[in-house]
């Protein structure tokens, strides 16, 4: 569709087609485009697709989100439940991006998504069971148990699990590592690209999630020695990818089955990243260092993700101060009898 043919009478569905072909393709990565299109096809078009752009008033958008908040997930082979708060936020982000372009093209005077305030605690018509979405992770005991058990697996599996646990790298970042990214002497791993997977496209090289995701992190001797062992007797070039013989999605499926087999709590592969960050927090590593290590865009992002962990540490700090004061008082009492 030619830009000159756009008008306020165009349907949202038709405008989305234009947006995908002329805006999104230059703005987002292939993986993000695929995720956005899933949201668009399953959530936005069925409810709003036939409305004209000029009809998208804030009251209509607010009603749309109220209905979304009471809708169910659309899984074929597992039980369905209320869609998550994170999904609702994702829907709003995608729709807002589309309508922002409509504003830039003067098809809308203002973005209706920015005119509404979603009260996530009450979106479900007074739904009282709202809980902040919590992350999953291994505690210290299970972390050590995994490191012990994973030594019994072949190196292809072991290396990716240990890197995830001990560095906090995203799966796409691990798959993006080449041998040139490892400085064995300084014990540093450089993260400067990712490899991601799309059905029909396969694995492809992509940029990092954001600029702050381009980073260097220090790793321990165990990772350096494991990489040396993994690389020995292999004929490779520096620009070869370290992870070559593992399926991008297959590793997640294998990891789930492996946890079941070993009677471990079931967490996602991505939760190995959360385990890394959570254990560092528990060990007293400062939040700024952890944020930089994870490649977050800001320290606020890190704090928002690990809110409940920080709250727990805050309580622990208060308890320690209380115990210190109690010890002091008991010390005074004991001096009376000595």
Image: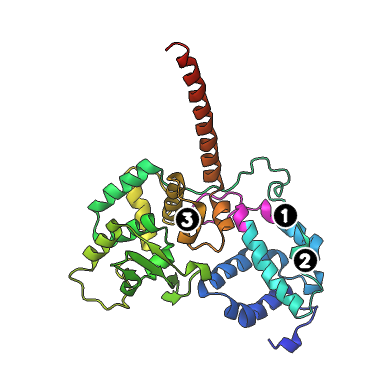
Where residue 197 appears, as percent x and y from the top left, is 43, 71
| Left or right: 242 as drawn, with respect to 53 | left
- Name the quadrant containing residue 318: top right
Residue under label 1: 118
- Name the quadrant containing residue 225: bottom left
Secondary structure state at the residue bearing disc 1: loop
Instruction: Determine which of the numbered discs, if any, sits on residue 112 in the image.
Output: 2
Residue under label 3: 290
Q: Which residues are magenta?
A: 67-87
Q: Is residue 251 visible?
A: yes
Report the Cα–Cα distance between label 1 and label 2: 12 Å
Tell me which colouring the rendered structure shows. rainbow
Specify the quadrant that holds the N terminus: bottom right
Q: Residue at x 67, y 53 (%)?
A: 69
Where residue 303 appears, as percent x and y from the top left, is 56, 52
Q: Nearer the viewer, residue 121 or 242?
A: 242
Where residue 268 appears, as percent x and y from the top left, is 43, 53
Q: Residue at x 47, y 55 (%)?
A: 290
Q: Nearer the viewer, residue 189 or 207?
A: 189
Q: Is residue 74 visible?
A: no
Q: Nearer the viewer, residue 213 or 240?
A: 213
| Left or right: 103 as drawn, with respect to 305 | right
| Circle count | 3
């Amino acid at each position: 569709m030619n830009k000159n043919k756009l008008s306020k009478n165009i349907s949202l569905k038709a405008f989305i087609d234009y947006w995908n072909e002329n805006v999104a393709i230059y703005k987002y990565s292939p993986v993000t485009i695929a995720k956005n299109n899933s949201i668009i096809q399953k959530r936005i078009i069925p409810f709003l697709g036939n409305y004209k752009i000029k009809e998208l008033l804030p009251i209509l958008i607010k009603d749309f989100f109220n209905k979304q908040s009471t809708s169910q997930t659309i899984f074929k082979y597992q039980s369905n439940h209320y869609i998550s708060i994170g999904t609702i936020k994702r829907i709003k982000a995608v729709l807002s991006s589309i309508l922002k372009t409509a504003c830039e093209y003067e098809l809308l005077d203002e973005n209706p998504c920015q005119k509404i305030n979603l009260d996530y605690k009450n979106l479900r018509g007074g739904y009282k069971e709202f809980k902040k979405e919590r992350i999953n992770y291994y505690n210290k005991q299970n972390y050590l148990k995994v490191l012990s058990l994973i030594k019994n697996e072949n190196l292809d599996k072991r290396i990716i699990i240990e890197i995830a646990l001990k560095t906090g790298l995203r799966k796409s970042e691990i798959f993006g590592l080449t041998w040139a990214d490892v400085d064995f002497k300084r014990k540093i791993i450089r993260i400067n690209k990712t490899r991601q997977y799309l059905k029909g496209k396969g694995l492809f090289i992509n940029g990092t999630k954001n600029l702050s995701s381009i980073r260097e992190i220090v790793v321990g001797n165990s990772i350096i020695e494991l990489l040396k062992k993994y690389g020995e007797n292999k004929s490779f070039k520096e620009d070869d990818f370290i992870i070559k013989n593992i399926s991008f999605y297959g590793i997640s499926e294998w990891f789930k089955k492996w946890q079941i087999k070993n009677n471990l709590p079931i967490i996602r592969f991505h939760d190995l990243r959360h385990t890394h960050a959570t254990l560092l927090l528990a060990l007293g590593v400062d939040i700024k260092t952890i944020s930089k290590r994870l490649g977050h865009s800001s320290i606020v992002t890190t704090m928002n993700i690990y809110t409940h962990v920080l709250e727990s540490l805050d309580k622990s700090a208060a308890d320690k101060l209380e115990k210190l004061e109690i010890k002091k008082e008991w010390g005074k009492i004991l001096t009376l009898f000595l």
